[in-house]
Amino acid sequence: MLAERVKLLYSNLPASLSISVLLALILLCVQAQVISPERLLDWSAAIASVLGVRAMLFIAWKRHARIIGLSDSRRWLYRFRIGVFFTGIVWGIGGILLAPPGEPELKMYTLLALAGLSAGAATTLAIDRISVIGFLCLVLMPQIVVLGIEGRALSLGISAMIALFLLFLIASAHQVSLQLEENFHLRLKATENESRLRQMLEISPIATRITDAASNQVVFANSSYVELIGSTPEQVIGIDPTGYYAYPEIYAEVQKQISNGENVTNQMVEIHSFGEQAWTKWVLASYFPIEYQNKAAILGWFYDITDRKIKEDHVEHMAYHDTLTGLPNRTLFVDRLKQSLANAERERCMLALMFIDLDKFKPVNDLYGHHVGDLLLKAVAERISDCLRKSDSVGRIGGDEFVVLLPAVNTEESALEVAEKIRHALNLPFEIEGATINISSSTGVAVYPNHAEEAQLLIKRADIAMYSAKAQGKNCVRVYQP
């Protein structure tokens, strides 16, 4: 088990180092405008040194992998852990040094980057509890402490969320580690004889199947695998399982690696039904070349992580969407705006941004209560969306403030037509819980490149145009003017 653990850890090391390098470069580029060059240079040197030493450690392990004994495995494990700890320290320090004060968006971006790094590490390091716990704590604990020390309600809330996220990652890594250890022990014993293999696999709680390497037909499937794909033992044997993969090309690549004698471990795979009962699941899949019934075969393990994947997707959705309307929030909308601006510059076309603020919304809350006000906001979001093309975007960035992005318009007049269409739609009465509610809207429009060529400036000028509409009597659309 020790030798297998060391092998898995070092096998995952190149991918981990590559991701760390890319993430560091992206983080440095994003923060370069607000962080001092000296601080960036110091942290860059530190992360480069640590990752460089770990890369050399991998090369050295690769040269000696075939002759490593039990005592040598322990030494290689200790060296790996030391590299992990130093990497965690540097990332933990970077999370503080590269989080600029007074820049909440960049600070949140840094936290999200560290969260993504930690989520990946929870999987790649799961086989070694000391490594995964040490790395996660070294990366996330400084952020938890610093945010907690700030003392503000928002900072304390974010600190608590990161702490819960840390506990969730540790618990998930522990479960994955247990499953990997169990997989290894089962696989080790399975080589003793085929009957023992079948017995052990059948009673395993992990979904398991064996496919013939030549025909790719299932020759064995345990009850957990049959339950996983919602079939029967009779129907499973003899089928080609490729149809269950949402992306068959991924399994084709697995078969190619197996044919080269390689193992494929901890691969997240999306599977789905192709019958009458539609379902989609996510599994953590591992594949190993074995001999079964005197033929080359592929042993597959499938650990159902659907619940965890759904929770992760929900957390990610909440981070980038308004909880009331489901529309993109400010962070996601600004990201879309920047992407659309880059595309508009490349395609040399115009782009329009609208700020829409509801008139007479506060009296609705005062008269009918916030519950009706929330329902009204949802209805407003639907009406705005109905006025747009599929390529357009709408987001909610404040209490009763919405933004609309038209990524491609021919003229300013085209943008004004859409804005007027939205204004007229919002002027129509809303029927909510038996009450007829009438509101209006004030809209400001700014166009790229006529009014601004940079995202924040375009946002500012659309906002100015909206306040101009408010000042000129409300219930109207105004284009930005210098």
Image (cartoon, helix red, strand yellow):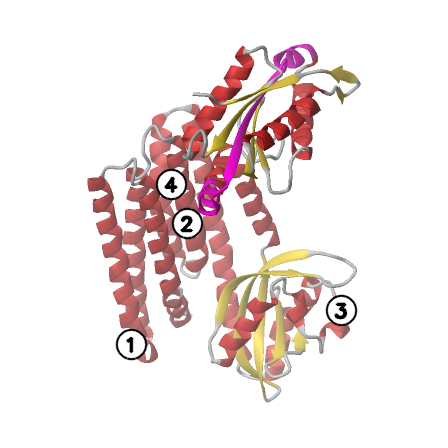
Which secondary structure, mark 3?
A: loop
Residue 63 bears which disc, if any? 1
Q: Mark 3, mark 2: which one is toward the viewer?
A: 2
Q: Earlier in the sequence, mark 3 or mark 2?
A: 2
Which secondary structure, mark 2?
A: helix
Q: Earlier in the sequence, mark 2 or mark 1?
A: 1
**Residue 275, position in %: x, y?**
76, 63
Residue 110 bears which disc, if any? 4
Q: Earlier in the sequence, mark 4 or mark 3?
A: 4
Q: Earlier in the sequence, mark 1 or mark 4?
A: 1
Q: Is residue 188 visible?
A: no
Q: Image point 50% across, 20% down: which residue?
A: 465
**Residue 62, position in %: x, y?**
32, 74
Amino acid type at circle 4 is: Thr
Q: Earlier in the sequence, mark 3 or mark 1?
A: 1
Could you tell me how far apart the alpha carbons at marks 4 and 2 are, in whole angstroms? 12 Å
Q: Mark 4, mark 2: which one is toward the viewer?
A: 4
**Residue 73, position in %: x, y?**
32, 71
Task: Specify the segment rendered in magenta.
Answer: 341-367
Amino acid type at circle 1 is: Arg
- Mark 3 — residue? 232
Quarter of the image holding residue 222? bottom right
Q: Callout 2: 10 Å neighbours few (<14), some, many (20+)?
A: many
Amino acid type at circle 3 is: Thr
Which secondary structure, mark 1?
A: helix
**Label 3–label 1 contact, CB within 8 A:** no
Quadrant including the C terminus: top left
Q: Callout 1: 10 Å neighbours few (<14), some, many (20+)?
A: few
- Mark 2 — residue? 118
Which secondary structure, mark 4?
A: helix
